Structures are given as structure tokens and as C-alpha cells.
Image: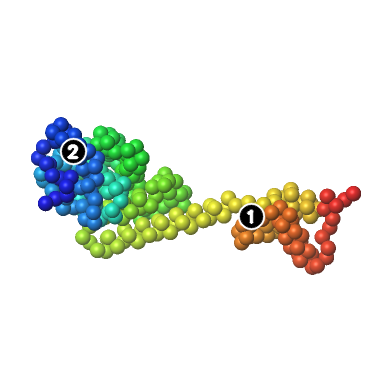
Amino acid sequence: MGPPALVGRGRSWVDRRLDDPMTATAPCDELTAILSGPDPRPALWEAIDSGRMAELVPELPALRMEQDPIHRHKDVLAHTVAVVGKTPDDLVVRLAALFHDIAKPRTRSYEHGGVTFRHHEAVGARMTRRRLTELGYPDDIVNDVSELVRLSGRFKGYAEGWSDSAVRRYARDAGHLLGRLNTLVRCDCTTRNRGKAEALQRQVDDLERRIAELAEADRRAAERPQLDGEAVMAHLGIGPGPAVGEALRFLLDLKRREGELPDDEIRRRLDEWWLSRRGGAAPPPTHADVR
């Protein structure tokens, strides 16, 4: 027997709701139940084969007739179920996996002897938003899943070489969904060629490493010492020159090591540094000391 959500699957949700308003399962809850658990594939195939999925997500069974030359499954539907089966038990990621190729029938075209699905991610994002809204999912889930579908093809071409700006743009566009997007990219590889599968995982590893390194570099570049150049010159009683830059680098390193410090402590440390730099000679009087 399948999950409880599948009981009564031969009749529409509306019919069951009219029979017993207290026990009928809402469409979004039913789809969520189908996608739950360690391996959602058996329940998903049961819902497809029984015709229930045609009521919940009518676009999904239509994928069965679409040959996918990229993934080389017998159809896009088989690839979709395989991708869903690889995902962690995260509803947003599983819904994105379920819908990530939903627009391929609508965008299919034949060019130069081959099949293309141009812009299917953008079209699919709009279809996903409409379907999830009709199913009754809350706005945050609708927004996140639709955005993941829209971004699901962004990783294509990474192996050909991305500039640092392209990596930053990928991370910026993904925003709070970056981790989930990378999970979806990893799962959207159902090839039986172990070498190709391992190569893709290494590419995602490399992308994540570069994102982390660039984020750290950007964070450091945006850092500022607690005193600016004008304050340093005023405190030490010096004019513009290399010493100001050295002082600012000292203050920035101090901030990285010890965090934000009180202003009087910052100035005391700066005096100590200046004294040691001058070989132990007393620092010149500051403007505040001049009477």
C-alpha cells in the first residue's frame, strides 16, 4: 500500500473533499507526501501510473513522450524521477527537481538535425510558479522553487572556464538558494558513465571552492581599519606618506586579529606601534597635545 496521501487516488481531490471535508488531503499536502521519505521514487511512479499525478501536476506525465538526447533516458520523465530520487529530503529541492525540466515539451524545437529546449528554464519557472500556487503552497516555497528552476541551467558551461566575475554573478544571483542550487546541479546528473559523473562532481566542488575564496577576498577588500588616514595623521602628527599606509595596515591587521576595540585602546596600540617603528623614540606630540 502506498503512502496515505495516495488512498482514494482514483477520484479527484475535489470529489473527495466534497465527500468528507475533514479528511480530504489538500493538493499541496498530497504532493508533499508523495515526495517525502528516503526514496520518493516508488510513490512518485505510483502516482504517475495511477493517473493521480495527471490531476496534481498534469505537465509531469506529459514528459514521458519527450525524448531527452542530453541525458539519454528513454524520456525526460524517467530522468526527472531519477533526479528527484537523488535529492536529499528537502521539500524545496525535491520540488525543484520535479519541475526543473517541466517546460521541455513546450520549448522543444529541431535545429541542425538535433533537438533543443531553448530557454526552458525561464519558461519552466513561470509554469512552476503557476502550478505550485494552484496547488496551495505558501509563497516562500513557491518563490524559492520557481527561482531554483529558473537558475537550474546556470551551471552549464562551467567546465569551459568561468571568470571570477562569472562565479561572483552565479553566487549573487542564487543568493540564499546557493547551497540548494548546487545540490540540484549535483543531482541533475544521472549518467551511468562513472567518469562523467565524477567529473561533474569535481566541477561543482571547484565552483564551491572558488565561491568561498572570492567571498573571503571580497570580505577582506571591503574591510576598513577603525581609524582612517586623516585620523591617523592627526593622532601621530604626521603628514601624508608611506607611514600612513603602514599604520593603516597595522590597524587593519589588529582588527582582524582582535575585532573591534574601544577608541582609546586603538590609539594606545597605534602609539605603541609608532614607537616601535621609530626605534623606541617617543612619538611626536599630537595636535591635541599642542597648547
Q: Which of the two residues, 189 or 283, is positioned nearer the viewer here?
A: 283
Does residue 16 appear in this view?
yes
Image check: 56 left or right of 214?
Answer: left
User: In the image, what residue occupies the spot 31% across and 46% down?
Assistant: 92
Residue at the limit of the structure toward the bottom, as seen here: 279
Local packing at callout 2 (Cα closer than 10 Å; few below 14, some 14-19, many 20+) is some
Looking at the rendered structure, the secondary structure element under dot 1 is loop
Residue hosting label 2 = 24
**Residue 64 seen in render:** no
Tag 2's secondary structure? Answer: loop
* Image position, residue 200 (x, y; %): 31, 58
Residue 196 higher or lower than 132, as above or below: below
Distance from Cα at disc 2 to Cα at disc 1? 57 Å
Q: Residue at x 24, y 45 (%)?
A: 32
Q: Dot 1, how many residues are within 10 Å of its Cα: few (below 14), some (14-19), or many (20+)?
A: few
Residue at point 72%, 57% (across, down) = 265
Q: Earlier in the sequence, mark 2 or mark 1?
A: 2
The mark found on residue 166 in the picture is none
Residue 35 point in image, percent of width and height: 23, 49
Farthest residue, direction right: 291
What residue is pinned by disc 1? Answer: 260
Q: Amino acid at mark 2?
A: Ala
Q: Tell me whether the residue at label 2 lies in contact with that at label 1, contact meaning CB atoms closer than 8 angstroms.
A: no
Residue 276: % across, % down: 76, 66
Q: Where does residue 140 sit, x and y in percent of width and height?
A: 36, 40
